[in-house]
C-alpha cells in the first residue's frame, strides 16, 4: 500500500512503498542516490549493490521518470541530515523498483523559479511548469484562500449557489463571449461577465445571503492583472447596507491574512480598521481611484487595504455621446426616488453620487460592489438616462423589471477577484502565475492551441459561415 513521502517520518524501521517522480539522481561509486518527490514532499532514496537487479534498474533512472520504490525507512547519519526538507532526517533503503513511465528531458529546468524562462515556452508546457515547488505552493495557497472564504461565509449563514454559464447577452460594460445556439439558429447565449443579474434574482427569490466562487468571462484586451476568464468571490445580501457589506469584507480579509499569511504587515487606521477614502479625495490626492497607500512600496510584505467610497453614479462616454454608469446600471444612486433622480440628472449627471464602493490593495482594485436599485421605476429611469430606449430596456432587461414587480427586498453586495488577490499575496508579477492554466497576454492557450479553427460540419450545424478577409 502506498505511503506518502512526508509520512516516512512516522515509519522508521518499517518497510514502505513510495511512488512519485525522480527529482535528481546522483551516482557515488557503488551507491546510487535519488531524490524522490510526490505531492507531499521529497526524500532521499538509496540503492546499494544488492539486490543486484534493483541496482541495475536504478542505474537507468533519469529526472522526471515515474517510479514505484519499496524499501526500509532508516535514520540518516547525523552528518547527512538535510534540514531543508521535512524528511531530512530519514532515507529509504530500496529493495524494489518499478519503472512506471520513462520521461523525455524537459525543455527547461524545473528546479528554478522559472522566471528566467520565456513565458511562451512555460505556457506551452504548463503541465511541466506546474511541477515547480513555487507553482505547487501557489496553487495550494490559492486553494486554502478559497476554502477559507467558503468556510467563513458558511459560518455567517451564507448559501453557495451556482448560477448559469450560458445566459443572455446584455450591455454590462465589456464585450460578451458569445455562444451560438444550434437549436435556435441565429441566436446566441453569452458567457457571464459576472452573475450580477442572477444574484439579484436570488434576492428576489428570498435567499437573502448568497455567495459563489464563480468563473467570469470578458472579451477585452488582456494585461498583467487581467485574463479573458477569471475567478471571483460573488456575494449578495438582502436588507443590507453599505456599512454591513464593508464590515463583512473587512472581517473576512483581515482574518484570512492573519491565518494564512501571518508574515504580512497590515497598514490599518488607529482603530485597527481598514482605511476608508472618498472617491473625490482619492482622485485629488493620488489621481487614482485605486491608490497604493503603503508607507514603503518596496516592502512586498506590507499590505495596505483601502475602501474607496462615494463614487459618482455616471461618467460621460465621449465616443458614444452619452452618460454611462460608472459601476453598472443596477447601482443605487443617492437620490430620494424617481422624481428626485430625474431632477438631479437633468441638473448635473456628474454630481450624482452612488452607493458604490471599491476594495483596493496595494494599488490594485480587488473588489467592486454596490447597493442595488430595488425600485423598478427607478431602474427603468436609470436605463433611459443612459440613452436606452424603453423598447430596448424591455428587450434587454424586461426579465429583471418583471421580477422586481413581485416583491424585491433592498439588497447589495460585492465581488472580490480571487486571482488578483492571490497574485498580490504571493508577490507574483502577474495573475498568470497564480492560475493553473492561464491564457497568454494576448489571450491564447499555447498548450491546447486555442483559439482554433473548427470543422466546417460544426459551423454548418450552427448555420454559421466564416467570412475570410480579402
Image (tube, grey):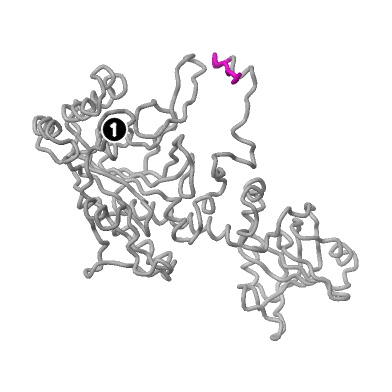
- In which quadrant of the rendered view does residue 321 lie? top left
Q: Tell me residue 194's x, y (percent).
A: 38, 37
Image side of residue 441 versus residue 52, left or right: left
Q: Which residue is mark 1?
A: 201
Split into 4 quadrants, where in the image is the C terminus?
A: top right
Q: Say which residue appears at 42% left-offset and 31% top-offset.
A: 175
* Residue sitting nearer the eye, 42 or 350: 350
Considering the whole magenta stretch, tell me its main secondary structure: loop
The residue nearer to you, when weighing 276 against 242, is 276
Residue 220 is left or right of residue 94, and the answer is left
From the top left corner, tell me how far across and down residue 422 is, in percent.
45, 56
Q: Nearer the viewer, residue 42 or 390?
A: 390
Q: Residues within 10 Å of mark 1 (few under 14, many from 20)?
A: some
| Part of the protein shown in magenta | 461-470
Q: Residue at x 65, y 76 (%)?
A: 88
In the image, residue 179 lies in the stretch drawn in magenta: no
What residue do we see at 55% from left, 16% from top? 464
Amino acid at each position: 500500500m502506498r505511503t506518502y513521502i512526508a509520512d516516512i517520518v512516522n515509519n522508521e524501521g518499517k518497510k514502505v512503498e513510495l511512488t512519485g517522480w525522480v527529482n535528481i539522481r546522483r551516482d557515488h561509486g557503488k551507491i546510487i542516490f535519488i531524490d524522490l518527490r510526490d505531492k507531499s514532499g521529497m526524500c532521499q532514496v538509496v540503492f546499494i549493490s544488492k539486490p543486484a537487479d534493483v541496482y541495475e534498474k536504478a542505474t537507468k533512472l533519469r529526472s522526471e521518470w515515474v517510479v514505484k520504490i519499496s524499501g526500509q525507512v532508516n535514520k540518516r547519519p547525523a552528518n547527512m541530515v538535510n534540514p531543508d526538507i521535512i524528511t531530512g532526517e530519514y532515507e529509504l533503503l530500496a529493495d524494489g523498483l518499478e519503472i512506471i513511465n520513462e520521461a523525455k528531458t524537459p525543455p527547461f529546468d524545473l528546479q528554478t523559479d522559472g522566471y528566467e524562462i520565456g513565458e511562451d515556452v512555460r505556457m506551452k508546457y504548463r503541465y511541466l511548469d506546474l511541477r515547480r515547488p513555487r507553482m505547487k505552493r501557489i496553487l495550494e495557497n490559492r486553494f486554502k484562500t478559497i476554502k477559507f472564504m467558503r468556510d467563513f461565509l458558511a459560518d455567517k449563514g451564507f448559501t453557495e449557489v451556482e448560477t448559469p454559464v450560458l445566459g443572455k447577452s446584455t450591455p454590462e460594460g465589456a464585450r460578451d463571449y458569445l455562444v451560438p445556439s444550434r437549436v435556435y439558429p441565429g441566436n446566441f447565449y453569452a458567457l457571464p461577465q459576472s452573475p450580477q443579474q442572477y444574484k439579484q434574482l436570488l434576492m428576489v427569490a428570498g435567499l437573502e445571503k448568497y455567495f459563489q466562487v464563480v468563473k467570469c468571462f470578458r472579451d477585452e484586451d488582456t494585461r498583467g492583472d487581467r485574463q479573458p476568464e477569471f475567478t471571483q468571490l460573488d456575494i449578495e445580501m438582502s436588507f443590507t447596507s453599505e456599512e454591513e457589506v464593508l464590515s463583512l469584507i473587512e472581517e473576512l480579509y483581515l482574518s484570512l491574512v492573519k491565518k494564512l499569511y501571518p508574515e504580512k504587515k497590515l497598514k490599518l487606521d488607529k482603530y485597527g480598521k481598514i482605511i476608508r477614502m472618498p472617491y473625490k479625495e482619492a482622485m485629488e490626492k493620488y489621481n487614482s481611484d485605486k491608490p497604493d497607500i503603503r508607507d514603503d512600496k518596496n516592502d512586498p510584505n506590507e499590505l495596505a487595504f483601502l475602501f474607496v467610497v462615494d463614487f459618482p453614479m455616471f461618467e460621460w462616454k465621449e465616443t458614444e455621446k452619452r452618460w454611462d454608469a460608472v459601476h453598472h446600471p443596477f447601482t443605487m444612486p443617492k437620490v430620494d426616488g424617481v422624481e428626485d433622480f430625474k431632477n438631479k440628472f437633468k441638473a448635473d449627471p456628474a454630481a450624482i453620487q452612488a452607493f458604490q464602493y471599491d476594495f483596493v490593495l496595494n494599488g490594485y482594485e480587488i473588489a467592486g460592489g454596490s447597493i442595488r436599485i430595488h425600485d423598478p421605476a427607478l431602474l427603468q429611469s436609470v436605463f433611459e438616462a443612459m440613452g436606452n430606449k424603453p423598447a430596448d430596456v424591455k428587450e434587454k432587461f424586461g426579465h429583471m423589471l418583471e421580477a422586481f414587480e413581485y416583491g424585491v427586498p433592498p439588497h447589495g453586495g460585492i465581488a472580490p477577484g480571487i486571482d488578483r488577490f492571490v497574485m498580490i499575496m504571493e508577490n507574483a508579477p502577474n495573475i498568470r502565475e497564480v492560475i493553473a492554466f492561464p491564457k497568454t497576454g494576448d489571450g491564447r492557450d499555447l498548450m491546447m492551441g486555442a483559439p482554433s479553427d473548427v470543422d466546417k460540419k460544426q459551423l454548418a450545424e450552427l448555420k454559421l459561415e466564416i467570412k475570410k478577409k480579402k
